[in-house]
Image (tube, grey):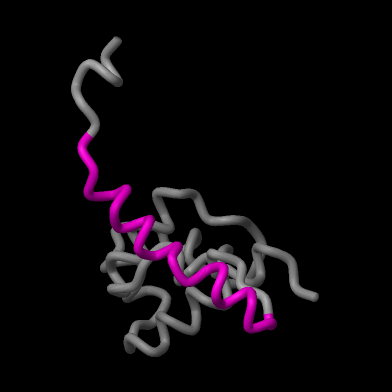
Amino acid sequence: MPDQEERVGARIASNRKLAGYTQNGLAAEAHVSLGAIRKVERGERLPTHGLLIAVARALRVTVEELTGQPYKGEKPSDRRTHAPVQGIRTAVRRHDLPVDWYTA
């Protein structure tokens, strides 16, 4: 079974190819180094959160699509369990916390 670095890298490579980018083109579009793209795609290192965000934006996909989260199983019950996750993520991203909550 491939480790996490290889899976994330493979998803980035697959999405990159589907979008019609070369590694160099994706690096330029995402404003990241070509070396970083190459190492992540080869599974030599995990991408940073910043790199994931930049690549996801450039490829017009979500970070979750690149990382494979939530980690879905093969059983129908797993699909039911994970079905509401995207809606929850959307609600959390749109929610504004009161200023006093994070400045206290």
| View extreme (right): residue | 1
Q: Position of residue 41 (x, y in %)?
A: 56, 71
Q: Which quarter of the rendered picture does the C terminus lie within?
A: top left
Q: Main secondary structure of the magenta part?
A: helix
Q: Is residue 46 magenta?
A: no
Q: Nearer the viewer, residue 90 or 17?
A: 90
Residue shown at 60%/56% (left/top)? 46
Which span is picked out in magenta? 74-96
Q: Position of residue 77 (x, y in %)?
A: 64, 77
| View extreme (top): residue | 104
Horizontally, is 61 left or right of 40 in the view?
A: left
Q: Nearer the viewer, residue 19 or 67?
A: 67
Using the image, determine if residue 2 lies above or below residue 46.
Answer: below
Horizontally, is 76 left or right of 101 in the view?
A: right
Q: Is residue 93 magenta?
A: yes
Q: Position of residue 69 (x, y in %)?
A: 53, 65
The quarter holding residue 71 reads: bottom right
Using the image, determine if residue 99 lies above or below residue 83.
Answer: above
Horizontally, is 65 left or right of 26 in the view?
A: right
The quarter holding residue 64 reads: bottom left
Residue shown at 43%/66% (left/top)? 84
Horizontally, is 84 left or right of 98 in the view?
A: right
Q: How many numbered badges does the structure rendering display?
A: 0
Residue shown at 42%/87% (left/top)? 17
Q: Nearer the viewer, residue 34 or 52?
A: 52
Q: Which quarter of the rendered picture does the N terminus lie within?
A: bottom right
Residue shown at 66%/70% (left/top)? 6
